[in-house]
Amino acid sequence: MDYEKLGYMYLGKKVIDDKQGLKYLYKNKNLTTHGLIIGMTGSGKTGLGINLIEEATMDNVPSIIIDPKGDMGNLLLNFPDQDPSDYAQYIDEDEATQKSMSKDEYAKKIASMYQEGIKDWDQDKSRIKTLGNKADFNIFTPGSNTGIPINILGSFDVPSDEVLSDPDMLNMNISSLSSSVLSLAKIDTNSSKENILLSNIFLHSFKQKKSLTLTELITSIINPPMKKIGIFGIDDFYPADKRMDFAMKLNNILADPSFANWITGFDFDIDKILYTPELKPRTSVFSISHLNDNERMFFVTLLLNKFISWMRKQEGSSSLKVLLYMDEIFGFFPPTKNPPSKEPMMLLLKQARAYGVGVVLSTQNPVDLDYKGLSNIGSWFIGRLQTNQDKERIIDNLITGPNDDKEELMTLISSLKSRRFLLKDTRVDKPFLFDTKWVLSYLKGPMSRSDIKKLMDPKKELLQINEKKDVHKNEVTNIANQKPLVSKDIKELFCYSYSEDLLFEPYIVAEAVINISKRDINKQFKVSHKIYIDDSIVDFSFSNQSLNDEELEYSLKYPQKSSFANLPEVASKLKNLKSVKKKFVSYLYNTTRIEIYEIPKLKLYSNLDESMFDFKLRIKDALNSKKDAEVQKIKNSFDIKLHRLESRLDKYAYKLEKEKQDVSAKKSDTILAVGLSVLGAIFGSKSSAASKVATSIRKAGRIKKEKNDVASTEVQIQNIQDEIDKISMIHESKIDDLDIKYSDENYEIKSTYIKPKKSDIYDTDVALVWIG
């Protein structure tokens, strides 16, 4: 198909003088400067949005779609057979009745309409099937088990190092997180003490690279990890009883049985949302129409912040790598207010381009938009609008230069009908009209809960759903009110969260820093192990003991009215911890084996904390970057040759048109001359008539010659066209070869292990820690 080209989206056909012309192919990389779709109900706005996502999917670009209204789930209604029974499953009985048809009759009509629509736009069933195979399509339903539930328990994850190292980014991240939590609890977010407290808790945890669950956040509100906020003590700034009231509001949300659907489900991990374990792209629809306004704001803000943190870890790219689409931004990006979602959305519009991320926003309400924030958008798709006020508002923001004509824009926008859009592109001198093509998915309108359940229930078993695990505490016996005595040479520390009625249990906590400097890897990391000391302990062996993955805060003192578990003899007899420290170093030296992955052909190695999945994603990006660079070289060479041939083609086309006009004019002259000559022979002198006839014959001969010239020019034009077709085939063949050359299947990943030297293990510290 002539529109099936790498890096181009077949969106429809250009419109000139109210007539459809050539197919319109939009470069997908243009979406890295983002897009905005505006149009009233019935304008074809949803169809254009689905069109863009389908075409991105055809180019192997994964998508995240935020769907407040419920329409975007239509992307999963992919019926390559176009059988009426497929459509019948998703047809509303009432809709068929309104058409005075049975459900089956209406399904036949819909199937027939889609068959004709697909055909009329030069598409076929095979393209529908290809789309369905290009990506893994899912509908996620946060806070509900209707579709794929999403686990936000780890939603307050530590941002990426790139965000942590950027104070402005970190503050934005924390500010929007705090505001979203307050929005969920229906608390005013404007400069409230609750907002300041939450922001400080997040900042304290994130600086220690510690993630927070919602449960831990509530606990931290009751007992903040900071002693001061500004110059005031925590209790002076925000008294304990007020903090308890605040914590109770959040706890009521957590205690609500319906909230269980927020903390079980698919991992809230952007990499996994974008790709399957086999690195097949995913088209992930987040349907949030079932949530209330506060819950929607909470989730959208979390998602945008998570996406930004993921994005900042990616390598830069000039090609489109990921599409983020939001189907209705009304209320999320207003002109005067600052809801929690607005700041991360603004940041994406400013920075996402550098990472190959395209953001497309859509709305039917052009008045409630912050146009200043939208000034970074490169492609404005304007559909039919309802009022002159809407048109005026849009036109005022479309005029960006001296060449923009307000009257012309008003005329164009006023002429729009359903599925016809005005495209104002910063890369094109003048705006133009185009009609959107027939999409491959069945546009049935908003998806009902039963529709989503029908589609997603079979997939739930295929996706790994993480359940919350129970944590069992140690069983403690032999409790005393006095702390057991230990040697003065043993380092003794205390760790606790509450100040009254504490029960302390004994642990050996050992920490060290390990330095790895091999295979282009130069990284230090801290390890910590703890051994619970009970009567079963015979020797302080670190085998089979738990890694201490908690960031513990230690004190040299403990509160009064504390109780202590018994300290077994194996620990109470120790004079110092030197032998334990020596065992710990030996244990680390003998057991630290760090698996890394490498691709010998590319001389690339994984990072220490990089999973196989993440490494594969990085390799995919590296291969795509190499391929994009070579594709660009091929395109540049092709464009030069094509431009030269098209110039020649234009020259011969002009020549042909002139020659045809000359032939036509001379043919008319000759016919007239011959006619006059014949009349002259009948009514005039014979010698004069003979002369005129001879002249007419010579003119006829010249016409024959010029006809031959026309034929010769047509041959030249055909030769040039054949040459264009030839270099186009070579160009496409070379690009196809690159797809094979840079397929990740051609690059074997091998595992290798690295270990530290004993001298690479340092800053070792061992202590007896009482944890309450």
Image (tube, grey):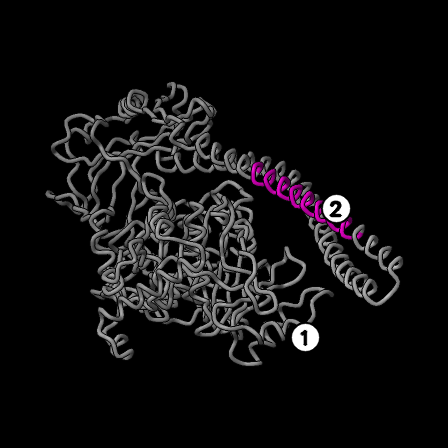
| In-image side of 433 versus 686 (left or right) | left
Q: Nearer the viewer, residue 159 or 713?
A: 713
Q: How many marks?
A: 2
Type of amino acid under label 2: Lys
Q: Which residues are magenta?
A: 699-727
Q: Which percent across, then down, holds residue 282? A: 36, 48
Q: Nearer the viewer, residue 654 or 16?
A: 654
Q: Which percent across, then down, holds residue 720? A: 64, 41
User: Mark 2 highlights which residue?
Assistant: 705
Q: Is residue 706 magenta?
A: yes
Q: Is residue 642 magenta?
A: no
Q: Nearer the viewer, residue 151 or 502?
A: 151
Mark 2: which secondary structure? helix
Q: Residue at x 59, y 59 (%)?
A: 376
User: Mark 1 highlights which residue?
Assistant: 407
Q: Which percent across, then down, holds residue 578? A: 30, 23
Q: Main secondary structure of the magenta part?
A: helix
CA–CA distance between discs 2 and 1?
51 Å
**Would residue 260 be visible to someone looking at this image?**
no
Mark 1: which secondary structure? helix
| In-image side of 172 versus 720 (left or right) | left
Circle 1 packing at 10 Å, graded few (<14), some (14-19), many (20+), is few
Asked if 150 appears above or below 756 in the picture, the reply is: below
